[in-house]
Amino acid sequence: MRFLSMVRVNESTDLRPSEQLMADMGKLMEEMTRNGMLVDTAGLRPTSEGKRVRLNYGKLSTLDGPFTETKEVIGGYAIVEAKSMEEALVLAERFLKVHGDEWDIECEVRQIEGPDSGGCGTPA
């Protein structure tokens, strides 16, 4: 089964990844890729560079970032291959633990629907 882990961050903080964090993260990603658990992962650029497209009852609109009404934003993602939600949560916990004590982040983990993920292809 495939799962999407969305990393939520508070974009208003100035905390940047240290060289040690980047090295530790690289080791974890290399291990997970080698074991067939990590399908894809990336960080996202700041919301100040993003846009939102909305369909509101037939009317399309586009909003330029930053999105100040949002305290926490998706700062990155990982697509993981796991046997169960429990195993996907263990992988998310490993990712969070690498960050140490100075970070305040969370991962939202959700199963991906579709033929490659063990799902039925349509939302419940």
Image (cartoon, rainbow, N blue to C red):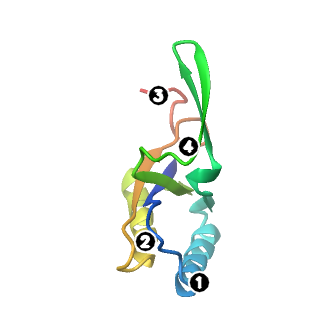
Q: Amino acid at mark 1?
A: Ala
Q: CA distance from mark 1 to mark 3?
A: 38 Å
| Residue at image mark 1 | 23
| Residue at image mark 3 | 123
Q: CA distance from mark 4 to mark 3?
A: 13 Å
Q: Is residue 76 above or below residue 118?
A: below
Q: Amino acid at mark 3?
A: Pro
Q: Is residue 42 left or right of residue 100?
A: right
**Residue 84 percent across, percent down from the top left:** 42, 52
Which residue is painted at 43% across and 63% down in the image?
A: 92
Nearest to viewer (mark 4 / mark 3)? 3
**Marks 4 and 3: CB-CB under 8 Å?**
no
Q: CA distance from mark 3 to mark 2?
A: 28 Å
| Residue at image mark 2 | 94
Neighbor class of circle 1 (other Cα within 10 Å; few <14, some 14-19, many 20+) is: few
Q: Amino acid at mark 2?
A: Arg
Nearest to viewer (mark 4 / mark 1)? 1
Q: CA distance from mark 4 to mark 1?
A: 30 Å
Mark 4, secondary structure of its residue: loop
Count the marks.
Answer: 4
**Residue 66 percent across, percent down from the top left:** 55, 48
| Residue at image mark 4 | 117
Nearest to viewer (mark 2 / mark 1)? 1
Mark 1, secondary structure of its residue: helix
User: Between residues 112 and 76, which one lies in front from this camera angle?
Assistant: 76
Q: Is residue 102 left or right of residue 54?
A: left
